[in-house]
Image (spheres, rainbow, N blue to C red):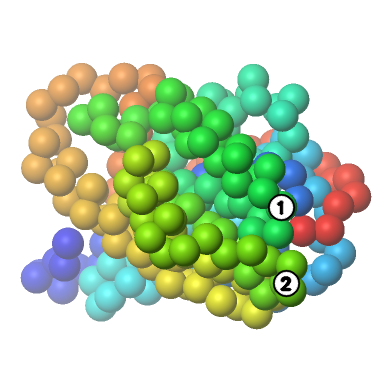
Amino acid sequence: MSNTGGEVQEYLYKILVVGDIGTGKTSIIKRYVHNIFSNTYKSTIGVDFALKVLNWDDNIIIRLQLWDIAGQERFGSMTRVYYKEAVGAFVVYDITRPPTFEAVQKWKSDIEHKVFLPDERPIPCVLLANKCDLPSAVSKSKEEMDQYCQENGFIGWFETSAKDDKNINEAANFLVKKILENHAEMNKQQGEEQPRDDVVQFSEKPQSQNPKPSSSGGCQC
């Protein structure tokens, strides 16, 4: 998507960060956006978001809105509102807590039913096996994870650690690259279909999206 004319292009992309409570979603975002880590982050209530600006290349500036969706089950009825206009997602589980891996399919299915690309494909999702720095971490084999992602529609997976800053940037760049590829494809199809309320429209210019600020409870992430 390089601009041969030299004019700088700016894109705004909304990315969801979902998963069960306590999987480290907020810690991942804080590490990625601010390069900080704390053991005392509090659990998100409702939704929160952060902005990351990427100088992708000489001609492209990308503004990523990372939407930190609360892991509590009771907020499931609100996710359609939170998911609207997202173009990619991270689904996070805690590698030390097997039940959070079992919940991954639920989160992926929730996304697939509530937000789509203009050609009705699902938005790209990357699976993050978080907290791999902990001694109690139980890693699955690469073969197992590759097969799981293929069977469940993930474009890829990464073992991550917000504490050790492992694979956070790599996972984000992997997802952004796929989003850019989709954006280029959508540009070729522009004007062929009427927009739908539940379908993503890629943003060429930064626009204001102002989710309600989150409150906080107590939980280490």
What quarter of the picture does the C terminus occupy?
A: bottom right
Q: Residue at x 23, y 48 (%)?
A: 183
In the image, taking residue 131 as reference, residue 157 lies left or right, namely: left
| Residue 116 in sight | yes
Q: Position of residue 59 (x, y in %)?
A: 24, 71
Q: Quadrant of residue 87?
A: top left
Q: Residue at x 67, y 49 (%)?
A: 98
Q: Residue at x 74, y 67 (%)?
A: 136
Above or below: residue 199 compared with residue 100: above
Q: In the rendered structure, which disc, 1 or 2, sits on the residue that comes first in sequence?
A: 1
Q: Is residue 124 visible?
A: no
**Amino acid type of the residue tagged 1 in the rendering:** Arg
Q: Which residue is mark 2?
A: 134
Residue that carries the numbered disc 1 in the rendered image: 97
- Quadrant for residue 122, please give it: top left
Q: Please, is residue 88 above or below residue 189 in the view?
A: below
